[in-house]
Image: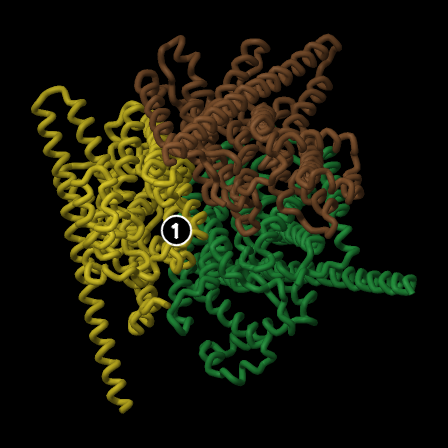
Chain colours: A green, B brown, C yellow
Amino acid sequence: MAPQYAPSLRSRLGPLLFVLQTGFILIFAFCAEVDSNVNVNGSTFKDSYTDFQDVNVMVMFGFGFMCTFLVRHGFSAVGFNLLVATMTTQWAIILNNVESWYYSGKIRLNMRSLVVAEICTVSALVSIGAVLGKTNPVQLVFIALLEVSGFVLNEWLLLNLLKVRPGNSMMLLHIFGAFFGLTVTWILYRKDSEQRFEKEKVDHKSGLFSMLGTVFLWVFWPSFNSALLSGRSPVRKLECVCSSYLALAVSAVTAAAVSVIFNPKGRFNLLHLQSCILSGGVAIGVSMPVVLQPWEAMLIGFAAAILSTIGFHLLQVGTTIKHGNCVLLLIHPKRALNSRSFLFFQIHMLLAFQCHDTRAILSTHGLPGLLGWLAHFILLIRQCDDHTTAVRFAVFHICTLLITITTSLSMGILTGTTALCWDSLKCVTFRVSVTITHAKLR
Amino acid sequence: MAPQYAPSLRSRLGPLLFVLQTGFILIFAFCAEVDSNVNVNGSTFKDSYTDFQDVNVMVMFGFGFMCTFLVRHGFSAVGFNLLVATMTTQWAIILNNVESWYYSGKIRLNMRSLVVAEICTVSALVSIGAVLGKTNPVQLVFIALLEVSGFVLNEWLLLNLLKVRPGNSMMLLHIFGAFFGLTVTWILYRKDSEQRFEKEKVDHKSGLFSMLGTVFLWVFWPSFNSALLSGRSPVRKLECVCSSYLALAVSAVTAAAVSVIFNPKGRFNLLHLQSCILSGGVAIGVSMPVVLQPWEAMLIGFAAAILSTIGFHLLQVGTTIKHGNCVLLLIHPKRALNSRSFLFFQIHMLLAFQCHDTRAILSTHGLPGLLGWLAHFILLIRQCDDHTTAVRFAVFHICTLLITITTSLSMGILTGTTALCWDSLKCVTFRVSVTITHAKLR
Amino acid sequence: MAPQYAPSLRSRLGPLLFVLQTGFILIFAFCAEVDSNVNVNGSTFKDSYTDFQDVNVMVMFGFGFMCTFLVRHGFSAVGFNLLVATMTTQWAIILNNVESWYYSGKIRLNMRSLVVAEICTVSALVSIGAVLGKTNPVQLVFIALLEVSGFVLNEWLLLNLLKVRPGNSMMLLHIFGAFFGLTVTWILYRKDSEQRFEKEKVDHKSGLFSMLGTVFLWVFWPSFNSALLSGRSPVRKLECVCSSYLALAVSAVTAAAVSVIFNPKGRFNLLHLQSCILSGGVAIGVSMPVVLQPWEAMLIGFAAAILSTIGFHLLQVGTTIKHGNCVLLLIHPKRALNSRSFLFFQIHMLLAFQCHDTRAILSTHGLPGLLGWLAHFILLIRQCDDHTTAVRFAVFHICTLLITITTSLSMGILTGTTALCWDSLKCVTFRVSVTITHAKLR
C-alpha cells in the first residue's frame, strides 16, 4: 500500500522547499563571502579540501545508501538523504557563523566552515535514522533543521558555560543525535507502536547497497574523526587516524564474533555487521582527545562492538516481542533469558516498548557514544596527577554530558510535540475539508 | 529481442579495436615521454594527482553507472563506458599535444595533460548519452573519437581566433557535447523515431545504480570545475569549490521542489533528480571565471535547476506525444497546457519530434550550459566600467558561443552523415550478400 | 541447499575470533606505539594518508564487491572480505615489525606501516579468491593468516639473501598470492572436483556489483602501484602513475577486443572484462622499476591483457569440459581447437582438471604477474652495458622468482595439508560423536 500523505501536506512540500531555499539565498546574498585567507587552522587548501571530500562522501554515499535496506524506502532513501543533507548543510553554515556575523557582519566561507557544517549535518542524519520509513519529506526536513539548530545551540552552551573546544563538543554528535532522534520517534509513534509499519519491511535484495553505504562509512571514518584537528600538529592527526583505523578494525572483527555467537545457526547476521562495525569509530571519536596508545583505541573498539552488538540483539528481541504483544516472551522464555544480562534487557524492553527506532541508532550511535564518553572519563581521571584536578575534571566532564543530553532531550520533545500538533491540526483540517466536500456533494 | 547488429559489423569490432590500439601504441612509442618537470601549473605532484583521481572517478563511476537505468543496457553500460573512455582518453592525449609535438617533436605526459584528456573524454561521454541504447559499440567508438577531435579543434579555434584561455574554453564542453550529440542522434534516428526503441526501456530495479552514478558526479563535481585552475592561486580554487558546492546544493533542493510540484501525486520523480541535480554544477562550471560572490553561484544553481527540470518535464511530455503520434496531445490537452510556457514548449516539441535523446542530455547539459554562458555574459557586462569595453566583451563572448555551436553542429553533421552512409553501405552489402547466399542456396 | 558446516566448526568461529582479537590487542598493548616522526620516507602525513585511503578503498570495495558475482555468496562476500581483511591487516602490522620489535622492543605505527600491511592483505585476498564459495569462514581466516605469514617470510628471505628492496619484493604479491591460492585449492578440492559446487553459481543480477568492485580496483590501481615509492622523488611517482594508467587503459581496450573475437556472437563477455582489464596494472606493478617509457608500459599492458583473456577463456573451456566429464571435448572438438595454441591449452587442461579456481586468479593475477616479471627481466638485460653485469642480473632475477614460487608453493602445501588434516579430524570426530549419539538413542 502506498504511504498515506495527507493531501494538504503533499501540495506543501514544493512551496516549502522553494521558500526555504529562497530564504537561504537571501541570507547568503546579504552576509556571506568567501574567506580570502585560505590556510585556516594550519592546513593548506588542498589538505582541507580532501578532508571535506571525505566527509562529503560519507554524508552522501554512507548515510544515503546505508538506509536502502527498507523495501519501500530503498529507491527514495538516497533522494531524501540528498535533499535533507543539502538543506541542512546550508542552514548549518548560517547557524555556525551567527556569532561571526554578529561581530563582523559577515559569514566567512572556507573549507573549515564547510567541514563543520557537514559534521552538523551528520548529527541530523543520525537522528533522521530513527524516523525513516514512517515520516514524510516535509517532516524530515523540519526535524533535520530543528536538530541542527539544537546541536549548534548545545555547542554554544558548552563553549560558553564550560569552555569545551568546538573540536571536542562536535564529536558528541552521536550522543546528541541518538537521544534527539529517540525522543522524536518516542513522541510521534508511541501510540501506534503495536502495528508494524508497512514501509519498514527489510529487503534482502537491496542489502548489498546497504552494505555499500556501511563500507563507505567504515573506510572514511578516520577522515571524519581527524577532520577538525589542526593541520599544525600532524602527529596528533596521525595518532587520530591510527587509533580510528585500529578501533574500527577491532570492532569489525568483534562484531562478527558476537554476531556468530548469538546466531543459533552460527551464521553472520548482516544487520549486526551493518550496525555494529562502526561502533569503534563512534566510541573513539568521542574519546579521541585522551587516547594516546594504540591498545587503548583497540580496547575501546572491542568494548564498543560488544556493547553495540548485544544492544542491537536485545533491541531486536524486544521489538519482536512488542509486535507479538508479549506472547512471544511467554512461549520462548529461553530466547529472552538467552540474553545473559537480564537487568539490561529490562531497560531495553522498556525503551523498545515505547519507541520505534528504524535504523537502530541507539545501538549504532547512542551506546558506543556513551561508552566513548566513559572511556574519555576514565582515561582523563587516570592521567590526572593530584586529587583536586581529578575531581574538577570529573565534574566538568559529567556536566558536559548532562548539558548535551538535556539539550538533546528538550529539543527532541519540542520538535516531536510541534510535529504532533501540526499533524493533528492538519488531520483535523483534512477531516473538516473532507466532511465539507462530502456535505457539498450530497 | 536481442539487438540486431549486422553480422559484418560484429566481426569488425575486435580487429578495429586492435588496429586503433596498436596505432596509439606506435604514436606513443615515437613521440611520448614523461615530463621531467613535475610541478606544472603551480601544483605539486600529489595535488594534481588527487585532482586527476577525482576526475577519473567521475568518468568511470559517474558516467558509467548513470546510464545503467536502461533495462537491456544496464550490464553493458559500464563496460561500453569503460571502453569508450579509455580509447578517447588516449586519443585526446595525442590530439591535445599535437602542437607541442609539432614544435618540439615530443608529447609530454604529466598529470595536467592526463586531466585535460579526461575532461575531453567527458565531452565525448556527454554526446554518447544521446545515442546510448540505439547504437552498437563500433559506432560508439567512432562517434566518441570524432567528437573529441571536434572538441579539440574548437578549443584550438577559440584560442587562436579569440585568445580564449584553455581553462575557460574546456568548460564549454557541456554545450559542445550536448549539441554534437543531438545533431548525431537527429541524423541517425529521425526516420524511425515513431517506433519505441526496445533497448531503451527503463528499469526501476537498477535505478539505485543509476542514482549511485549521479551521486558520484554530484560529490566530485567541485573537483571537476576546479581541476584546471592553477595551484598558484589557492584563493581562486577555494572560491571555485565553494561556488560549485553551493550551486550543486541549491540545484538539488530546487530540482526536488520543482519535481514535486510537477508530479500530480506529489512524489519525487527520481529521473528528474538524476538529470537535474547536476545542472547547478554545469552552469557554474561555464560561468566560473566571473562568479565572485556565493549568492551569485546559488542563484545560478537555482535558475539552472528550474530550467533543467522544466526542460526535462516538457521533453518527456513531447516524447510521449511523439510516440503516441500526436493523439495524446488531443486527448490530454490539459497535460500539455499544464506546462505553463507554451512558446518554449513548442520549441521543445519540434526538437522532440525530430530527435531522440536517450539520457536527456539537452536538459542535463545543454540548457544549463547555455544558462551558464548567459550568466557569464551578464556578470561580465555588469563588471565592465565603460561602455566600449562592455561592447567589446559582449561581441567577444557572443563569438565564443557562435564558434562553439557552429563547430559542434558541423562536426555532428559530419559524424552523423558518415555513420549513416557507412550504415547504408553496410546494409546494402549485407543485403547483397544475403541475396547472393539465397540465390546460391536455390 | 544451505552450506554444510560441521556443527563443531560453527560453534568455534566466535571463540576463535575472540581469542585471536584478544591476542592481537595484548601484543599491541605491550609493543606498539605511534611513531612520533610523521614524515616517513619523504612524504608528509597528508600525502601518505591519501595513499593509505586509496589502498584501503581498493581492499574494502574492490576485492569485497568483486566477489559478489556468486549467487549464494553475494551477500556475505563483502562481510567475509571485511572480516578477513581487518584480521589480516592487524597480523601483517605485527609481522612486518618483528625485526624492529626485536631490535628496539617497539612496533612503530605510521602511515607507511599501515600501507605495507594493507598491501600484504591484498596478497591474502588474492589467494582467498581461489577458494571462495567452497570454504567456511574459519578456514578463510586460517588460510589468510598463514598466507600473510608466508608472504612476509618471502620478503624477508629476498631481502636477506638477494638484497631485494621491500618496495620491489612487495609487488611480487600477485605471483605469490596466485600460486599459494592455487596450491591450497588443489589440495583441498582435487577429490571432489567432479561435482559442481552449489555455492559457486554465477548470478547475472549481482553482476553490476561485481563490475563496481572491478572499476574501484581499476581506478585506484595507479595509487596502489605508486604507494610504496618515496615521496622524495615525485618524478618517479609521476612515471609510475602515468605508466600504470596507460597500461590499464590499454589492457581494458585489448581485453574487450579479445573478448569480442572469442565470443561466437560478437558480444562482450563481462566475466572477461572483470578479470582481464586489471591485468595491465598487475604486470606493470611487477615490472615497474625498469619501465621508463610510456610505450613500454602500453606494450606490457597489451601483452598482459591478451595473455590474461586467452588464459581465462581456455580455463573456462577446461572447466566446462571437466564438469562434463570429457564428453564435451568429443562432441565439440571445434570449440576446443578453436583456441589456437594447443600446447598451452593442454597445460591449462591439466591445471583445470586438478584444481578449481573460483575467481580465476591464475589468469587475473598469476599469468600477468609472470609476464610482468618477464618484462622486467628483458628490460633489465637490455639496459645493461656489458655482458658480465647482464648475466649477474639475470641470475639474480631468476633466483628472485624461484625463491618466491618455492616459498609460495611450500606455504600453500603446508596450509592446504593442515586444513585437510584438521577437516578430516573434525569429520572423524563429528562422525564418532554422531555414532555415539545414535548408539545412545537406541
Is residue C97 at least partly visible in the picture? no
Task: From this view, report whether residue B214 is shown above or below residue C85.
Answer: above
Is residue B273 at least partly visible in the picture? yes
The residue at the point 31 percent across, 73 percent down is C7
Q: Position of residue A262 (x, y in %)?
A: 42, 71
Task: From this view, report whether residue A411 is shown above or below residue B2.
Answer: below
Q: Quadrant of residue C391?
A: top left
Q: Amino acid at mark 1?
A: Gly
Task: From this view, report whether residue C153 is shown above or below residue C167.
Answer: below
Q: Residue furthest front?
A: B442
A440 lies left or right of A208: right
The residue at the point 10 percent across, 33 percent down is C395
Quarter of the image with the C terminus of chain C in it: bottom left
Q: Position of residue A56 (x, y in %)?
A: 54, 43
Q: Which residue is mark 1?
A: C64
A12 lies left or right of B188: right
The residue at the point 56 percent across, 22 percent down is B412
Q: Quadrant of residue C366?
A: top left
